[in-house]
Image (cartoon, grey):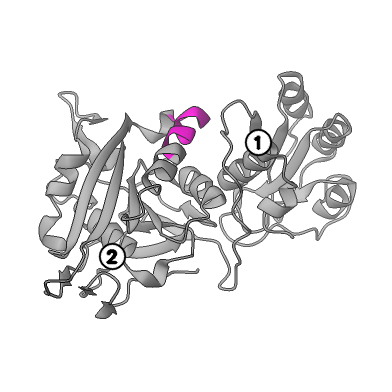
Amino acid sequence: MRRLFCTCAAAIAAVGLLVSGCSSGGSGAGTASASQGPSDEPAKVVVLATGGTIASTHNEEGAVVPTVSGEELVATIRDRIGENVDVTVRQVAELDSSAMTLHDTDTVLSAIQDTFQDESVTGVVVTHGTDSMEESAMAADVFHADPRPVVFTGAMKAFDDPDPDGPGNLADAVNAAVDPQHRGQGAFISFGGDLLPARGAFKQHTSTTDGFASNAPADAQRPRALKYQPLAGTTVWTIASFPGAPRELIDHAVESGAKGIVVEGMGAGNVGTDFAAGIEDAMKKGVKVVMSTRVAQGPVEGVYGGAGGAATLFDAGVLGSGYLRAPQARIALAAALATQTDPAEVLGQQ
């Protein structure tokens, strides 16, 4: 697993900060204390709040719903970040991230790009629900050409939980956003004491506070950032394969107007014979197909032959998702189609 951690006691000369006391296990951020001096310029972090569990409380029935503003979130971390860090908040949405559409993703991406128009901004933090955080972070990474970091974070416990993890995660994210060692590396997910490159990150557990992990190899390279184009209106379906899965699943996607399909295959990227026939027919109609896997760890590889083996399908034109799992492969394919870019490039295969 590839993990990047904040550097304890790392001097941040550009903004006059000292980042200290790294957190672990989701226990909260180390406090970044500012060195004092009349010429010091504060580091400026903009928090883009979108809702999610981090901004949710329990209603009368005990269900968790978004109710907390970004300003209220930031108020909980003032003593965990440096005095020389200026944090401002922009409320972008108040969503449960499982309800997000590509239109909502575009709203977040536009907010990120608009914020970076201000040259005084040091970094951006996006508070986000965990259900689709890996997709939004991937989308941000695909289009993020600016060297300043954008860091996604959230929580597994609600804001009103007796021991919430949100404040620690948010403080970690702010401290990461002002750390110059993270410049030029794209988007990140800061969660449970870990700072993960967005590309290859995935939600590994439904409830534990270390809910995210990475499938990216240590030597993974980011493809070039694409010029932003809205993703909404680009129809890409994700279809899970299973033993005996019928080709009708693929046929229906094509008939419904899908321009791209991500297949969540078995093993290293294999499907049944009938399903494979549907894939090949879809490609003959111009639909782009990417093969991922339902397995949590490891690469998608063309190892097996036969009608539904990944080796056979790759020879027929299916693209492998590499270390990306289906949620992020879908975003990569949508971005490729929206920008008229070779999907292999966005998937990191060129």
Could you tell me which secondary element the residue under label 1 belongs to?
helix
Q: Which mark is residue 25?
A: 2
Q: Is residue 264 above or below residue 12?
A: above
Q: Which mark is residue 338?
A: 1
Q: Quadrant of residue 264?
A: top right
Q: 55 or 336: which is nearer to us?
A: 336
Whether residue 159 appears in this view of the structure is no
Residue type at mark 2: give it: Gly
Q: Is residue 245 left or right of residue 51?
A: right
Q: Residue furthest top?
A: 256
Which residue is rendered at x = 49% and y = 52% of the image?
A: 202
Which residue is rendered at x = 22% and y = 64% of the image?
A: 29
Which residue is rendered at x = 27% and y = 63% of the image?
A: 175
* Sequence order check, earlier mark of 1 and 2: 2
Q: Determine the CA span between mark 1 and mark 2.
A: 38 Å
Residue type at mark 1: give it: Ala
Could you tell me which secondary element the residue under label 2 belongs to?
loop
Whether residue 175 appears in this view of the structure is yes
Q: Is residue 253 above or below residue 230?
A: above
Q: Quadrant of residue 168?
A: bottom left
Q: Quadrant of residue 120?
A: bottom left
Q: Quadrant of the image for the C terminus?
A: bottom right
- In the image, which residues are magenta? 100-108
Give how far across and how far down residue 43 sits, in percent. Answer: 25, 62
| Chief SS of the magenta region | helix
Q: Is residue 312 above or below residue 254?
A: below
For mark 2, does the 10 Å Cα neighbourhood hold few (<14), some (14 to 19), or many (20 or more) residues? few
Q: Is residue 175 above or below residue 306?
A: below
Give how far across and how far down residue 333 sits, in percent. Answer: 66, 42
Q: 249 or 177: which is nearer to us?
A: 177
